[in-house]
Image (cartoon, rainbow, N blue to C red):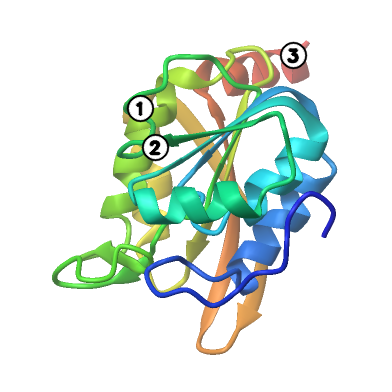
């Protein structure tokens, strides 16, 4: 892939997999000024965004993952920030891409895959951190979820964050369905609904 070097297996860094490629397909045709990726891991998605957006910010809680992603990136417009979710970010974004850890787990032992008891707790923390960072007019979050996690509960709780979401794609992979969610500010969804009423 242009802008990103070949992935080398590295412990503690999420290796691009089917969920990564599903998110990559979703963001590939999008473009704009500012994009944010939460939990960049290997940097694969950030590299795609770097070709389509003027400025990209990629965050990860793991400094090791960020250094790895930065060393593998050929994109000059990608900034790498070590922080929890988007806690250190205050800009507004056209697009936020999230492939959160979503496997249900009693304890978070592997931050690359363990999503909390219902598999949505880490994803909800990421969404809370980013909900105020979307541009209100056309901003959107694209996020991967799994049928193994309580993604219906996640969707129904978005309203509390001032967000609205729906399922835009679903793909069977092994023992789970990978689900692509598109999430927008509630104001945008309300305005779209009102426009259709006219």
- Residue displayed at 75% across by 47% down: 48
Contact flag, marks 3 and 2 (Cβ < 8 Å): no
Residue at 72%, 68% in the rendered image: 6
In the picture, measured across the screen, residue 143 lies left or right of residue 29, that is left
> Quadrant of the image for the N terminus?
bottom right
Of circles 3 and 1, the one toward us is 1
Tell me what residue is drawn at x 47 percent, y 49 percent.
67
Q: Secondary structure at mark 3?
A: helix
Residue farthest to the bottom? 174
Query: For the residues carrying marks 2 and 1, which lies nearer the camera in this image?
Result: 2
**Label 2 sits on residue:** 127
Q: Residues within 10 Å of mark 3 (few under 14, many from 20)?
A: few
Mark closer to the observer (3, 2): 2
In the picture of the structure, the residue carrying the numbered disc 1 is 161
User: Residue 82: percent from the left, percent from the top?
Assistant: 37, 38
- Marks 3 and 2, how far apart in space? 27 Å
Quick check: 34 left or right of 96?
A: right
Vertical comparison of 162 with 165: above or below: above
């Amino acid at each position: 892939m242009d802008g990103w070097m070949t992935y080398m297996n590295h412990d503690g860094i999420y290796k691009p997999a089917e969920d990564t490629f599903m998110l990559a397909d979703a963001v590939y045709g999008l473009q704009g000024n500012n994009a944010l990726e939460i939990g960049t891991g290997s940097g694969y998605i950030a590299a795609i965004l770097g070709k389509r957006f003027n400025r990209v910010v990629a965050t990860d809680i793991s400094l090791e993952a960020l250094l790895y992603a930065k060393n593998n990136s050929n994109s000059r417009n990608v900034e790498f920030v070590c922080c929890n979710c988007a806690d250190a970010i205050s800009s507004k974004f056209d697009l936020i891409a999230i492939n959160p850890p979503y496997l249900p787990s009693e304890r978070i032992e592997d931050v690359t895959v363990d999503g909390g008891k219902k598999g949505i707790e880490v994803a909800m923390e990421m969404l809370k951190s980013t909900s105020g960072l979307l541009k209100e007019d056309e901003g959107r979050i694209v996020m991967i979820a799994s049928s193994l996690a309580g993604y219906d509960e996640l969707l129904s709780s978005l309203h509390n964050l001032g967000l609205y979401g729906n399922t835009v794609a679903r793909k069977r992979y092994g023992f789970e369905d990978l689900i692509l969610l598109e999430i927008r500010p509630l104001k945008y969804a309300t305005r779209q609904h009102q426009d259709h009423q006219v």
